[in-house]
Amino acid sequence: MQQVPFSISYQINDLFEYSEQLAQAFGTSVQNGILLYPAEVAIGCSKFFKINEFISFQLAHFRSTTKIEFDRLPSFNNHITISIQDFTFAKCPKHKGLCSEILIDNNSIGSIQCKSTSIHETVLIAPDTEIKVIFVLLKQHWIENVLRDETAKEKFYKYLGDSKANLRKEFLTPDQLKLIFEIFNHKNDSPLEKIYYESRVLNLLESFLTDVLTKDEADNQFLFANVEDIKEIQKAEVFITNNIDKPFAGVDYISKMCFMSRTKFINLFQKVYGVSSFDYYQKKRLNMAYEALKTGQHSVADIAGNIGYTSVSNFTIAFKKEFGLLPKDFLYKMKGQGVSN
């Protein structure tokens, strides 16, 4: 097995204990809740916050300079981790071997994931990858002390205890994307900084948990993508992603490529990704357009062409339907805020 230049194994019991473990592994220290990464590992930092005795969170924004492995060992508690990730929109994190091992590179997609700390997970980050992650830790007594609805408690315990459940949301809503954008583009170093971050993280947390706990199970397809299903359908997702700038290949072609009947493919893809294969193709390329427009460096016409739209008008209609804003207005807004990469 090829050795990873930087690797850390750890358990999650307390987020501030984890920050000290991370600092020790890096050969640095945590100052005022901020961990600066050494240049030989990454450029950037992590900030750590505690909201109350049940909730703490980490804001990590860095670009890796080498391959990094984070090996999270199972803990003896049942704390809950929620990772809100804003990666470049292109490909989903690729599962290698066991589904608990995830490779993240600049082709990874934004998502929200929820797991128990008792589950083993290995995350591999490729070199030169920009990472933006909001990592929330809910202590195990959070469910009992915060959730007042018994049905919601039972549902949450059921999801966390089901090894085949995958509490994951692939596509973030415009409101969720807006909150993440505000968090990672906040530059006002003021006494209100902690309140600024806390309010937005709590809004994101509420948004995700509302989906998980208040909707009927039949409406929560993204919760039930089990390990076997993910492995079987992943080749279809990879094919769609690799051909995102081309016309959609069609369900018949892709299902045959996966050696599945049309019906099985349609049902399985919907179960794993929560949308049809065509809607996935549409959402993914529109999210790619969103990311490109966010830089303020590309024209609407260029972006439309790069993701396979032959008509700027059709692109404009699709973008507004997805994000509630015309692409030219979104571009103007980004340029007005002085956003660039």
Image (spheres, rainbow, N blue to C red):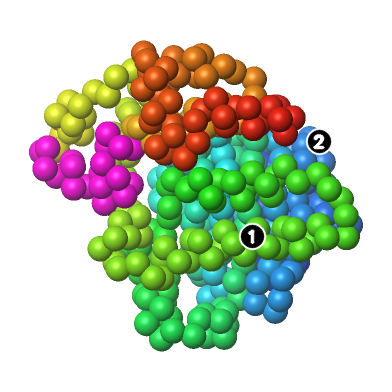
Tell me the SS state at disc 2: loop
How many numbered discs?
2
- For the point 61% across and 76% down, the residue is 139
Q: Main secondary structure of the magenta part?
A: helix
Nearer the viewer's eye, disc 2 or disc 1? 1
The residue lying toward the viewer, choosing from 91 and 317, is 317
Return the x and y of residue 219 as percentages of the image width and height: 29, 60
Q: Residues within 10 Å of mark 1 (few under 14, many from 20)?
A: many
Q: Which residues are magenta?
A: 261-280
Left or right, 245 with reference to 183: left
Was residue 258 drawn as part of the magenta stretch in this picture?
A: no
Left or right, 103 with reference to 341: left
The residue at which mark 1 appears reads as: 201
Was residue 271 drawn as part of the magenta stretch in this picture?
A: yes
Residue 216 image label: none
Residue 39 image label: 2
- For the point 63% across and 54% down, the residue is 134
Mark positioned earlier in the residue sequence (2 or 1): 2
Q: Quadrant of residue 341?
A: top right
- For the point 52% across and 19% down, the residue is 300
The residue lying toward the viewer, choosing from 209 and 63, is 209
Residue 19 seen in the figure: no
Residue 264 seen in the figure: yes
Return the x and y of residue 35 as percentages of the image width and height: 81, 52
Going by the numbered disc 1, the residue's amino acid type is: Val
Going by the numbered disc 2, the residue's amino acid type is: Ala
Q: Residues within 10 Å of mark 2 (few under 14, many from 20)?
A: few
The residue lying toward the viewer, choosing from 158 and 311, is 311
